[in-house]
Image: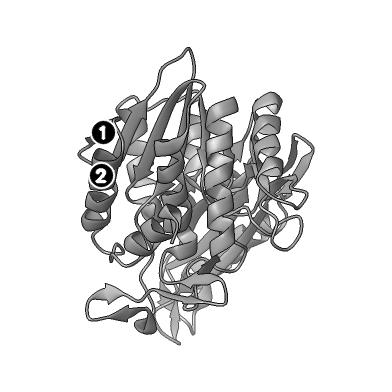
Amino acid sequence: MSDTLALTRRLVSIPSHEDERAAGDAVESWLRAETDAAVRRDDAGNVIARRGDGNRSLALVGHHDVVAPADEQVRDGEYVVAERNGRLHGRGAADMKGSLAAAMVAFRDADPATELVFASFAGEEQGGVGARAAIDEGFAPDYAVVGEGSTGYSAPGVTDVAVAHKGRRGSTLVARGESAHASEPEAGENAVYRACDAVDVVRGLDAPETTVLGQELRGSVVVTEIDGGSGWNVIPDRCAATVDERTVPGERADLGRVESVPGVEWTVDQDLPPMACDDADFAEAVLDAAREAQDGNPRHVAKPHATDAGWLAAAGTTPVVCGAAEPGEAHTAGESVAIDVLERCERIYRGVAESA
């Protein structure tokens, strides 16, 4: 069994959906035992290690928290790990303890061309809690390869390099009115009607779009929930609607326009930033490493999902995303990752570290 597979199995077996400290302990102890790097654990639970030196720094980035498992993915307090048909099954195998293990082995084995940094963040599934804490404390590598999924985008089984991804802005619009008896609607101000007027504004907004290194990204903005009223015979004095916006680098829908409707307020609840790689040479260097590591023909692609690469890009790091997970695997009851792709990702990360 390869070191990458053995380490993936170990990490995947450790529950980390409610409390990721045990998984962080495993990452930290392995780095201290297997490398001579300077390793530290910050107050947010992030594990960060550094080795080598140079005028630039390259980070291999992942996270060790996961979403809650399905019932069949847990047995006797640990996550179930199984190998079938060349794939490793278990919560977090794809998102993203497999790529995390590959990055750890590459961090240990590479002969880096510059300062090499490893970071495993906590709280990625809670909106990038760990990444934001690390950035606030000065985490600022020049370049980063974030090990979220990029396999199977251009063709089945091919590990591509994502140079951009969408972000997500979740927000709420609240319409307020004045209640009255439904038999006398003119005596009140119907908050549902005001909310509907605001929803019409949302429907009329143009979806943002842009191009990053030849990759086209088109965002979206859509109302996903609506709630209002207190009874069948009462004019409602409050109605709220949830808006899901998929953002693209440099562009936002003008959602503030909903406040032109009388009585409507708009509040942003979550804003996960999009990512754009701003260095074509770095993006090409990672793609070269991906070509060397596999028989397929990897390409630059764009991802639809937000990752910690967005926080890094917003803070000034130049990131790309490259990892083993395929579309549709993360957060599922049957989550799995191809074992040969794990080994491939270790080669890609090592190749980038030794050449970028």
Task: Residue at 35% x, 76% y: name it.
Answer: 80
Residue 119 against residue 85 in the figure, above or below:
above
Residue type marked 1: Val
State the image coordinates of residue 200 (x, y, percent, origin top left): 67, 61
* Quadrant location, the C terminus: top right
Q: Nearer the viewer, residue 219 or 6?
A: 6
Near mark 2 (Cα within 10 A), the count class, few <14, some 14-19 or many ≥20, is: some
What numbered label is drawn on residue 28? 2
* Quadrant location, the N terminus: bottom left
Q: Nearer the viewer, residue 77 or 189?
A: 77
Residue 299 against residue 225 in the figure, above or below:
above
Residue type marked 2: Glu
Asked if residue 202 can be seen in this view, the reply is yes
Q: How is the image coloured?
A: one colour
Q: Are marks 1 and 2 in contact (CB under 8 Å)?
A: yes
- SS at badge 2: helix
State the image coordinates of residue 167 (x, y, percent, origin top left): 56, 47
- SS at badge 1: strand
State the image coordinates of residue 329 (x, y, percent, origin top left): 55, 68
Task: Residue at 34% x, 24% y: name it.
Answer: 138
What numbered label is drawn on residue 39? 1
Residue lying farthest to the front in this orientation: 1
Q: Quadrant of residue 299?
A: top right
Near mark 1 (Cα within 10 A), the count class, few <14, some 14-19 or many ≥20, is: some
State the image coordinates of residue 316 (x, y, percent, origin top left): 50, 25
> How many dots with numbers?
2
Could you tell which of marks 1 and 2 lies nearer the N-terminus?
Answer: 2
